[in-house]
Image (cartoon, rainbow, N blue to C red):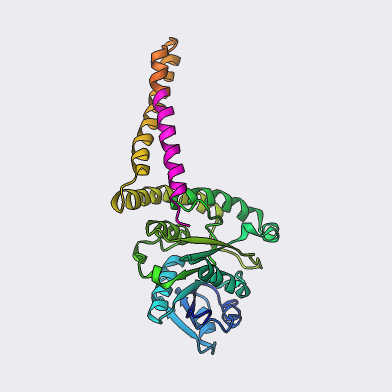
Amino acid sequence: MYRGLTVAVAIPAYRAETTIGQVVGTLPALVDRIVVVDDASPDGTGAALAALTDARLDVVRHEKNRGVGGAMKSAFRRCLELGADVVVKMDSDGQMDPAQLPALLDALVDSGCDYAKGNRFLDEHALRAMPRVRLLGNLVLTFLTKMASGYWHIFDPQNGYVAVRASVLKRLALEDIADDYFFENDMLVHLNILESRVVDVPMPARYGDERSSMRLGTVLRRFPVRLVDRLRKRVWQRYVVRDFSPIALFLFLGAPLMLAGIAFGAWAWYESAKTGVVSSTGRVMLSVLPIVIGFQLILQAVLLDISSSPR
């Protein structure tokens, strides 16, 4: 227990036979329950877990691999069944320092927020230690996730070292959250729909010899499309269904206007290039005006969305 809160640590485990024992063994005494989900690991992860004697340990086994998100959803449900007040998500590869756990919990208690997450970009030494490929990928995904989730004040959305209040978990539609590595990004979108308050905590990461099964090329190819879809879902749920806002109106008017202006301008340019006849001022203005007005409406929607970000 920590500051009056029952703490459970949730760990998704896949191909973690060499690291899971150390991760569980280094968790501090303030942790009341440890829930590890063996996500149908084909290696000796199950045997490694069976050899552990920690009385706090509770193992959930999947018959089929469900991905990190699917494993976390099982872990969250089990932690709620065990009566946890706060659930901390840690990975099984040993990259997350257990010594940083109190910082996440303090952020929840002291700020009154609902969800605390690590941010490696707030620590200068962590930035130097981070591989450049991961740094580049995080920068790109951070901007896209800010837009999709509405949490414009947070950074490093791929950081999986998080703590969440059980009261918030009970309200989340866990079945609607992604089962794969998109899980952390999708969590933020669903948290914003509930207007949950999120806080960043400086959190250095540790990089060893382990290899991640998440590939940057795959992430940058698939995540942007999914983030755009989550943006649409968030705007609809939060600014139309739950409480109609000018943000939705500005977006629904601005986006079609801007696209129409771009499409008409492209067609006019093609016609002019094909015939050799310079487009008239009126035709140019028919393209420019929708683009300008649409951009202004979208910009206003973004500014309002930033001011509406739960803090």
- Count all numbered tags in the image, as a single digit: 0
Residue found farthest to the left:
241
Point 34% across, 46% down: residue: 245
Occupied quadrant, residue 84? bottom left
Occupied quadrant, residue 274? top left
User: Looking at the image, which is closer to me, 266 or 201?
Assistant: 201
Whether residue 293 appears in magenta in the rendering, the answer is yes
Residue found farthest to the top:
277
Image coordinates of residue 68 in percent, x first then y, are 46, 67
User: Looking at the image, which is closer to me, 237 or 12?
Assistant: 237
The secondary structure making up most of the magenta span is: helix
Point 41% across, 18% down: residue: 285
Whether residue 263 appears in magenta in the rendering, the answer is no
Image coordinates of residue 254 in percent, x first then y, are 38, 35
Image coordinates of residue 311 in percent, x first then y, are 48, 57
The answer to whether residue 91 of the structure is visible from this angle is no
Magenta segment, which residues? 289-311
Q: Left or right? Give the position of 31 relative to 267.
A: right
Up the image or down, 163 lies above or below 266; here it is below
The answer to whether residue 210 of the structure is visible from this angle is yes
Point 61% across, 55% down: residue: 134
Image coordinates of residue 269 in percent, x first then y, are 44, 19
Up the image or down, 197 lies above or below 252; here it is below
Occupied quadrant, residue 190? bottom left
Point 40% across, 49% down: residue: 231
